[in-house]
Amino acid sequence: MVGAIFFIALSYKNKFTFYPTKFSFVSDVIAIGLLFISLGVSVMKGQGFAFSRVNTNDFVAGFVKQSVKADVRIEEEVASSSGKRYIVQLLRINDTVVYTKAYLTLKEQETSFIPGDIISTYTFIRTIEAPRNIGQFDYQTYSKQQGVYFQLYGKEFVRVARANGLKYEILRWRFYLTEQVKNSDVLSDNAKGLLNALILGKRNDIDKGVLAQFKELGVMHILAISGLHVGLIYLMLLTAFGFLKPISKQVVVVLLLWLFVFLSGFSPSVFRAVFMFTIFSLARIIRREQSLEHNVGLALFFSLFFYPNWVTDIGFQLSYLAVISIVYILPLFAKRYSANRIVKYIQGIVYVSLSVQIGLMAIQLYYFKQFSLLFLIGNLIVIPLVTVLIVLGVLYFMTLFIPFLNQVIGIAFNLLTDIMYKSVSLLAQFEGIVIKNVQFSKTQVFIFLALLMCLLLFYYRKSRVWVLSSFVLFFTLQVVPYLSRYSEEKRSELIIPYSQNREQVSLWYKKGSHLLNCESDPQGEGSYSAELTALNSTISNMTIQSIELKPLMPIEEQFLLVLSDSLTIYDIGFQAEVILLTKHPKVNIARVLNYHQPKEVVLHNSMPMWFKEKCIETCIKNNIPFHDISEKGYWSKLFKSD
């Protein structure tokens, strides 16, 4: 309600509601932003109320680590290193109706399912694990953003029904087309993966090495369906239905584009592009001029109105920042195009690439911590090839029932796929093309975007206020890293990581960019564990000193006692604040806890399960907090110096 009132007030002031004019960047963004946030929250609350028949997630959490009978509906198959893995809608646990999403993992030899299949299975329920160590991908948070909260491991199962409705019919068409590609005798494995990615939005079958090369070259966006793909399909459909009357043609094309949205997995970038083309087509039907800025604003509004969780989706953020960058930065190059068509086409690719990279630079550094210096060359090679590949991909699906023509198109698709992959592979071999391990904070992202906005406002409005604001923000952007580093130097942290090698027990003491690596079996200078390598990627210019782990570690005027099968002495004459239990120390745990009365006990993942359960029981009995690294991941404690 507050957002709606504020929106109406500002709209009336700017005469935006009654007389749409050029997009007012500041006031209209604030107004529309407040409106869709308010409406989005309302929608989320309404959905929560609709399913308040049971507090689903809390209810399901009560069955974690238990085997139960569950009814689930298959939504989508996802990539998995072993076995079959699906996103499923959890419908029932035992005799209780529930409503939440989960991952379902089945063995490789089990029967494959298609979207809409309802199966009954005896399954083991687990929560999705949090990152076990610093620097690892937070799969738990990512899954929650997708609305997925649990992991199911299916044992015995039976298909009991199949869901009906337009949604599942379209998903089954998508599954059918994907299977047609996988079973093709003409397409190579690389071509199959690329075709599914470009047309159906499924990148599961693209080789991880190829994905890494595209990422390092800065052309990863090519593999995600976006405005380029939708624009080409839009033009192809307009040509194919050119025999219809103008209004009928626009209506048919828009309906087919929305069918494509569902076939491609309903990703934020596809929704945004198709919605904008829908507004464009509607404006042509009613013969009214439309503003590109308004189209972007409406697409953003409706995206977050129906799917508020998209605001935290990286693809959503990249998609909208990219198109906004094109809208406001690309006009800066308007007077720099050549009259020659070929040169103009090349310039168009360069200018669009520059506009997008400028707008996305901050968020790319924040999320991916790297930047490619060859993105321009990469785009010049990849974009023309992808343009032809998209056309061939659409024609391939259209000719599935014309074998000879389908084979010819498949051969051409193979050839262009090989050319593109080899070109990317060649460019990716150049040393130093990627600046890696760049530390860019969330604060720097907002400052950079504010600086970019002020520079654009100065260009469009020629006001000295924006020049002054730009200087202030530029100075702040330079100062923030030094302030962060100063703050980091005054703060130290003690970390006990999850060890993939159960025989290795590590303890890290980090102060600023210096790290003391204490290991039960030191690997030698320059030889680090996978856990330490991941941590190193999160800190700029980190220096590492490795020493042997001692039974008593003095840390910031506190003591940490380490007990293991070879370290069993605990009566040291004074109390330790933290006790680290590793492997199987042959001591009486109750006596150890009574002797030290520690503030916390850390249970290392190298401990046998039976012994760990005994220690947990003793901690609970003595009312002493404990941290199970196997369940919760790494343990850490911060220390701040004056």
Image (cartoon, grey):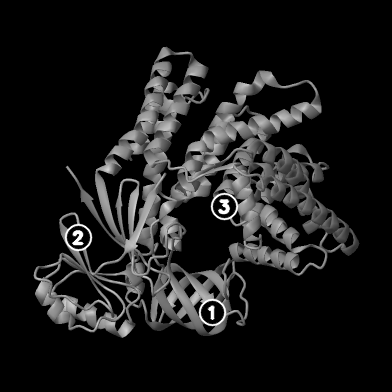
Contact, mark 3 vs mark 1 (Cβ under 8 Å): no
Q: Residue at point 74% right, 47% down?
A: 423
Under mark 1, the amino acid is Ile
Q: Looking at the image, is 164 positioned above or below residue 537? A: below
From the image, tell me which residue sits under label 2. Answer: 554
Residue 274 is at least partly visible in this image: yes
Q: Residue at point 28% right, 79% down?
A: 566
Which quarter of the rendering shows the N terminus? Answer: top left
Residue 43: percent from left, percent from top? 40, 51
Residue 213: percent from left, percent from top? 64, 51
Q: Residue at point 29% right, 43% down?
A: 488
Other residues around mark 2 within 10 Å, as few (<14) / some (14–19) / many (≥20)? few
From the image, tell me which residue sits under label 3. Answer: 267
- SS type, badge 2: strand
Residue 215, disc: none
- SS type, badge 3: loop
Which quarter of the rendering shows the C terminus? Answer: top left
From the image, tell me which residue sits under label 1. Answer: 119
Q: Nearer the viewer, residue 374 or 328?
A: 374
Q: Looking at the image, is 368 positioned above or below residue 359? A: below
Residue 590: percent from left, percent from top? 15, 81
- SS type, badge 1: strand
In this image, 336 relative to 73: left or right?
right
Q: How many marks?
A: 3
Under mark 3, the amino acid is Ser
In this image, 382 relative to 446: left or right?
right
Under mark 2, the amino acid is Pro
Q: Upstream in the sequence, badge 2 or badge 3?
A: 3
To which quarter of the image does residue 505 belong? bottom left
